[in-house]
Amino acid sequence: MVDLRISQLQAAQALGGAERLAGVQNGQTVAVSAGQLARLTQPAAPGQVASRCLFNRTFAATPKQFMARTFHRAMDDIDAVQLLEANWYNSGGTETATGGAATVSAAIEYPLNSCTRVTWAEQATGQVASGANLLSDLVAVTIPRGAWFAVRRYVTNPAGIAFASVCDTTDRGFGPDVFGYAPSGLADQTMTTAPVATAQAAGPCAFPAAIVARTRRASFGIIGDSRSAGALSSSTTGAFDGEGNLGEYAGALHGRGHATINGGIYGTTAAAFAASNARQAEAIGYCSHVVLEHSINDLTGGRTAAQVQADLLGIATLFPRARVIVGTTPPVSTSTDGWASANNQVAHASNAQRVALNAWKRQVPRPFADCWEVADLVETARGSGLWKAGLTGDGTHESAAGYQAIAGDAGWAAKVARVAV
């Protein structure tokens, strides 16, 4: 046995025993076996290295082209990077092929107004089959950890375009997200140094499914519903934080220096992900950690805690090389005063099942590595089924203040620090 500080642990492999996060404090010295140590000291491997990667959540048949420029922060030093392009969308939980092969060209913009072409099999364009993901060649570009960069992507598809439903139009130091689309005639601006032009109103956008480079740093794939996606009282509205992240987890993780893929999909369930997951799991497989947020739509839809437990355990088996983490589930309630007080709220009829499910999660049953406490941060008291004042606007989703409360919690900081490398 050897002593190894938690801060030295590399995040590429999941381990059991003393190294499980639930039983280890940050900075504590623990004993690990020689076999565990060998797995912990593997060289850097391809992994998610940037912020703000999202999955397509909708599809439109009339436009056949789009041009997007999205901004991202490097969470490790990068000297070569790959993009994962997705030609599918997930609406309500089911992965759906677009029905046509997509042609993509792309560039990495770093520094500002300096574009490096992305290639596929050494060609300037890639062909992505309907319903598939396609990983680009390695692109030689040097981006220091912490720097902002942009990804420019031009996609054409005779069947239509798949995209997300959120666009951050705030310039946070490297420009806003920009997204333009048209039936035809849209210019390819991937290799221009001018700002990407668009005639469309702010709203939808399209993001890479993953941004991959060799890394030893922890990264997090988030599997969940509209709460992960950052919805407010309307599923078309996103609660962006100060660096363009969304939802219960992405902002908190980004703030502690971790790369993320935010796989939050409006209206979905654990049951839906368990049944339809191949392309999502392929992308999230580039993350060393997976966070499971699902539960509330299952429970309010009439499923039991035991049924959701079975689905979460099944989802965990899809990621045998990752540390899989579950998060507790905040409540759902109705209110007669706009959730300004607890006295005028009534908990959803499924609350007893939610309480039972959260109790199970807090036990950190195997194979989970940890449980992250979210419900206690927004609920008036554990198990009450009622929201703290000001932390929801519709009784189902957090308000912007609710998401901020989760991201800023000191307990979260300690939990995330345990897996920093």
Image (cartoon, rainbow, N blue to C red):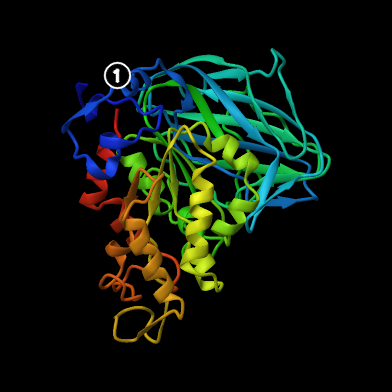
Answer with left or right where residue 325 lies relative to residue 135.
left
Query: On the picture, is 199 further left or further right than 391?
Result: right
Q: Horizontally, is 417 left or right of 267 in the view?
A: left
Q: Quadrant of the N terminus?
A: top left
Q: Amino acid at mark 1?
A: Ala
Q: Position of residue 135 (x, y in %)?
A: 63, 25
Q: Position of residue 390 (x, y in %)?
A: 31, 71
Is there any visible trace of residue 346 in the rendered image?
Answer: yes
- For label 1, the crowd category at 10 Å Cα-Cα, with few meaning under 14, some 14 to 19 and many 20 or more, is few
In percent of the image, x 69 and y 12: which residue is there?
122
Is residue 421 depicted above or below 232 in this figure? Answer: above
Front residue of 347 and 115 = 347
Closest to the observer, 213 or 375: 375
Q: Could you tell whether 190 is left or right of 325 in the image?
A: right
- Residue highlighted by disc 1: 34
Q: Quadrant of residue 125?
A: top right
Q: Name the residue nearer the viewer: 195 or 160.
A: 160
Q: Which residue does the image show at 42% across and 17% down from the upper left?
A: 44
Residue 420, percent from left and from top: 29, 32
Q: Is residue 110 visible?
A: no
Quick check: 74 above or below 180? above
Residue 308 to residue 384: above or below: above
Residue occupying image coordinates x 64% and y 32%: 85
Q: Element under label 1?
A: helix
57 or 132, nearer to the observer: 132
Total labels: the figure holds 1
Residue positioned most to the left: 28
Report the quarter where the C terminus lies: top left
